[in-house]
Amino acid sequence: MLPKFTYARPTTLDTALRTLDERPSSRVHGGGTDLVGCLRDGVLSADTIVSLSSVAELRGIRTAADGSFRIGALASVADVAADATVADRYPGLAEAAASVASPQLRNQGTIAGNLCQKPRCWYYRGDFHCLRKGGELCYAYNGENQYHCIVGGELCYIVHPSDTAPMLAALGSVCRISGNGSSRSVPVAAFHVLPAEDPQRETVLEANEIVTEIVIPPPPAGTRSSYRKVRTRQVWDFAIAGVALALTFDGDTVAKASVFLSGVAPVPWHAAGVEAAITGKVLDAGTIAAAAEAAVEGAEPLSENGYKVELVQGLVAEQLEAIAAG
């Protein structure tokens, strides 16, 4: 059952931000596909829900005069997946958006909401007062952890559930963030917070801030991008592991590489080792094998998720082979 709350539906961004600022115990509602479940299950509480659905300035997908591509925070995941410019310039993002959840959830869920999702850990979502909810320990560490992280999991071993976040990070995207009387820009690659920094936060957003749009720079000539995730079921499931690639080629040589992993860390995981292994190289069998090994450097699997190490290696190798083939 949903708790009682006051519902506000502002029609301008300024009014929405002012409402959030004036009501500290408020939550932002975009598509609501995650928020409603969290409220119903008692993961979150709120005295006020501030709906953004009537704030027209947060909608729209367009190419700006400077060549950047701008996605309004309220653009649905389905709209991003179906956009012709996304498919042409950023095919990896189209693949990532199309892989999110089910058609119904892609139609309802927003791109900003997909970035700001709460973790799917069954201890966090269940009746456990875990570290992320203000408790003293992470129950996954010695519990059922087959879907939890293998890197970056100091203190809390969640995995970040977004498919679009790692691809947007690989593309060098930036989140535009607004508060009441303030604004800032944060790279998507720096938007999420590791548990070692703060085990009770997922993003850098303050309580009175919202993402207003996502800006993707124009892809350099010779850029190829892709996203693929592995899941327990063929459709409608979160990633066990995934890889987002944005590689710029000079002939057959990788001139620049940006690689992020999904499903293996509490944040979209920057696979710097993979980038170093392939930059300045031709993607031949030896280079790809070295990159696959580098993808899991420093991995510390838990008692039930060691299978993810080989899974990530195979996924990285397979996707590098595919992107090399053009």
Image (cartoon, helix red, strand yellow):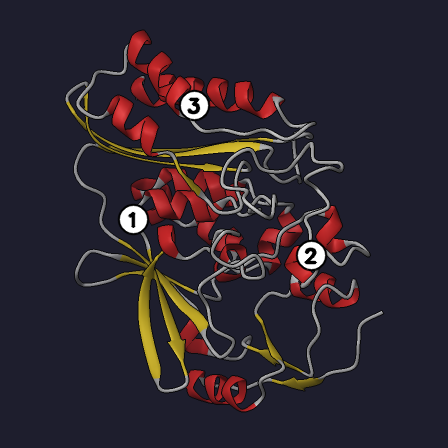
Towards the viewer: 214 or 307: 307
| Secondary structure of residue under mark 3 | helix
Q: Residues within 10 Å of mark 2 (few under 14, many from 20)?
A: few
Q: Quadrant of the N terminus?
A: bottom right
Q: Is residue 233 left or right of residue 4?
A: left
Q: Is residue 148 left or right of residue 320?
A: right
Which amino acid, by three-letter code, is at mark 1?
Answer: Gly
Compare marks 3 and 1 and give the one earlier in the sequence.
1
Q: Is residue 205 above or below residue 286?
A: below
Which label number is shown at residue 136? 2
Residue 33 visible within the image: no
Q: Which residue is mark 1?
A: 172
> Which residue sits at x=20%, y=18%?
281
Mark 1 and mark 2: span between their CA atoms?
36 Å
Q: Is residue 163 left or right of residue 132?
A: left
Rendered location of residue 298, percent (x, y): 45, 29
Compare marks 3 and 2 and give the one earlier in the sequence.
2
> Which residue sits at x=63%, y=47%?
103
> Which residue sits at x=53%, y=79%?
54
Residue 18 visible within the image: yes
Which amino acid, by three-letter code, is at mark 3?
Answer: Val
| Front position among marks 3 and 2 | 2
Q: Is residue 10 above or below residue 110?
A: below
Quadrant of residue 248 within the rendered picture? top left
Quadrant of residue 282 within the rendered picture? top left
Which amino acid, by three-letter code, is at mark 2?
Answer: Glu
Q: In the displayed image of the protein, which residue is found farthest to the front?
A: 136
Which label number is shown at residue 316? 3
